[in-house]
């Protein structure tokens, strides 16, 4: 039996078509929450199995509000993935995080409005703790793997997720700066929270593509600007993933592995059978 993937990477097509990815398999999965954004690609990289998922679908056909975040995380869980790295484009809300830089944030602010935020409900209640939404251990490893690429890299900062797909107004952007936000994007919430519910380690490699619209001496963000910078940083992202994979072992030493241990509040006898079955992959070890 093939080993479970040591890492799941959620990002764009430039990551799952890496030239040194071998023994490639495609997994077209169906989850209890529907189909993920695209079939998952699993291949061997640096001697370890790695799973890749195109967040916006093959060909970038899904807007941030249309992504089935629950199906994406659940599908990775089905493959046995325990660690997830999100490779994301973002805007900077501070002068020192410049376009072209990479940031490994340590906090998250959810300002989305219309997304399914949890696997739980329909007879099974869970209140998962997310004071630290990103895995500290995986974030440190990701920073260490990114540094040798030579791309300017920063650790820390709060990432605010907006609904999208439009970009911010200047009033919104300046308000977010006033709140102390460092980065702005459209996909990290609820992805990070769902990963926590699935007891998966989750970290973000955020690629700064622009200064949003607050910086009066810079051009306001455009889609062309975002994709141009992401393409320029693609080689660095690929190398950082290679470096990270080399450093990983199946064992984890963090709190993510039992994030649900104190979160489930519904008496087991009251959980509807259909809900128990749908969430069995997530809660089976606690319900017996």
Image (spheres, rainbow, N blue to C red):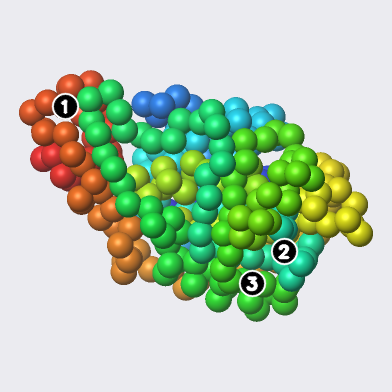
| First in sequence: mark 3 vs mark 1 | 3
181 left or right of 3? right
Q: Residue at x 37, y 40 (%)?
A: 78
Q: Earlier in the sequence, mark 2 or mark 1?
A: 2
Which class describes the residues within 10 Å of circle 3: few (<14), some (14-19), or many (20+)?
Answer: some
Residue 256 in percent (x, y) is at 33, 58
Question: Residue 148 versus residue 267: which sits nearer the camera?
Answer: 267
Label 3 close to label 1 by CB (< 8 Å): no
Horizontal side, residue 66 vs residue 89: left or right: left
From this viewpoint, which residue is outermost toward the left? 269
Question: Rounded to the nearest whole Å, what is the CA distance between mark 2 and mark 1?
Answer: 47 Å
**198 w.r.t. 58: above or below:** below
Q: Which residue is mark 3?
A: 154
Mark drawn on residue 83: none
- In the picture, measured across the screen, residue 192 lies left or right of residue 123, that is right
User: Mark 2, mark 1: which one is toward the viewer?
Assistant: 2
Question: Which residue: 57% across, 59% down?
Answer: 158
Q: Is residue 240 visible?
A: yes
Q: Residue at x 49, y 72 (%)?
A: 140
* Location of mark 2 (residue): 94
- Helix, strand or loop at mark 3: strand
Q: Which residue is mark 1?
A: 271
Helix, strand or loop at disc 1?
Answer: loop
Residue 43 visible, this angle: no
Q: Residues within 10 Å of mark 2 (few under 14, many from 20)?
A: some
Question: Left or right of 180: which side holds 217?
Answer: right
State the image coordinates of residue 270 (x, y, percent, origin top left).
Answer: 12, 26
Q: Nearer the viewer, residue 194 or 82?
A: 194
Quadrant in the picture for residue 45: bottom right
In the rendered image, which quarter contains the C terminus? top left
């Amino acid at each position: 039996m093939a080993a479970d993937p040591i890492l799941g990477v959620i990002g764009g097509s430039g990551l799952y078509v890496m030239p040194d990815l071998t023994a490639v398999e495609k997994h077209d999965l169906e989850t209890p929450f529907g189909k993920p954004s695209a079939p998952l690609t699993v291949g061997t990289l640096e001697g370890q199995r790695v799973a890749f998922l195109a967040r916006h679908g093959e060909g970038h056909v899904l807007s941030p509000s249309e992504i089935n975040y629950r199906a994406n995380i659940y599908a990775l869980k089905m493959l046995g993935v325990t660690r997830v790295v999100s490779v994301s484009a973002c805007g900077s809300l501070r002068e020192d995080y410049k376009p072209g830089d990479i940031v490994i944030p340590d906090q998250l602010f959810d300002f989305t409005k219309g997304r399914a935020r949890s696997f739980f409900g329909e007879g099974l209640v869970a209140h998962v703790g997310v004071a630290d939404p990103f895995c500290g251990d995986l974030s440190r490893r990701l920073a260490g793997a990114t540094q040798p690429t030579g791309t300017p890299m920063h650790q820390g900062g709060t990432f605010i997720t907006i609904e999208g797909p439009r970009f911010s107004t200047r009033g919104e952007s300046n308000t977010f700066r006033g709140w102390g936000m460092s980065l702005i994007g459209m996909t990290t919430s609820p992805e990070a929270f769902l990963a926590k519910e699935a007891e998966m380690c989750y970290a973000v490699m955020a690629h700064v593509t622009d200064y949003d619209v607050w910086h009066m001496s810079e051009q306001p963000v455009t889609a062309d600007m975002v994709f141009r910078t992401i393409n320029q940083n693609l080689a660095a992202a690929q190398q950082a993933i290679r470096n990270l994979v080399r450093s990983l072992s199946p064992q984890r030493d963090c709190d993510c592995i039992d994030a649900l241990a104190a979160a489930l509040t519904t008496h087991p006898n009251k959980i509807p059978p259909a809900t128990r079955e749908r969430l069995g992959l997530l809660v089976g070890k606690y319900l017996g």
